Amino acid sequence: MEVLRTLIGPDNGDANAAQLCARALILFFIGIAYIRIAGRRTFAHATPLDIVVALIVGSNLSRAMTGKAPFWPALAATLLLVVLHRVLAILTLRWTWLAKLLKAEPVVLVRDGEEDRRVMFLHGIGEDDLLQGLRLEQVERPDEVRLGTLENNGRISVIRRKADAV
């Protein structure tokens, strides 16, 4: 426990730049984990990576601005997160396994007019949520859908069935 206290520094605002950077790294990965646990629908239209960076950067800048954290160390920790975000975004273009870990994968909710209730349950999508997503795509019923997918950003995308197949 003493090693962790040395790593992250005191809680009285006297942490140095390295300790604030260590805190930022720890919070970064914990934040991604928490958002992944909360599920995609919690923060639609952004990836967990984007959300964590936005939250921590805002918080760090706020603390630096109000004097709750030393100014330069808080800025150093914030810069570290912004650079880490950029590096991870670039790395997700090269390594799909990392993209899947940080950004999630689309999941199929409806295939050939048949709803996958198990997948809907796992992702917290109820019947009303599905129908709302379909309506936003100008579709009235699931049986009109060839493929309905919960996308990485929390939205439901739809590919219609051919008119004569319905």
Image: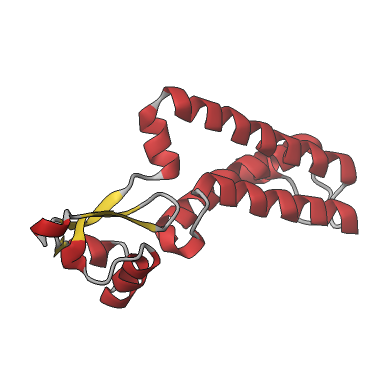
User: Observer-nearest residue: 54 or 146?
Assistant: 146
User: Residue 90 vs residue 113: left or right?
Assistant: right
Could you tell me residue 33's position as x and y percent? 46, 51
Q: Quadrant of residue 12?
A: bottom right
**Residue most extreme to the top:** 94
Q: Quadrant of residue 67?
A: bottom right
User: Observer-nearest residue: 134 or 46?
Assistant: 134
Could you tell me residue 146's position as x and y percent? 18, 54
Q: Name above or below for residue 44 compared with residue 56.
A: below
User: Residue 84 vs residue 61: left or right?
Assistant: left
Q: Name above or below for residue 63 compared with residue 29.
A: below
The residue shown at (65%, 54%) is 55
Q: Which of the image's four quarters has the C terminus?
A: bottom left
Residue 27 visible within the image = no
Residue 31 visible within the image = yes
User: Residue 104 vs residue 64: left or right?
Assistant: left
The residue shown at (38%, 45%) is 104
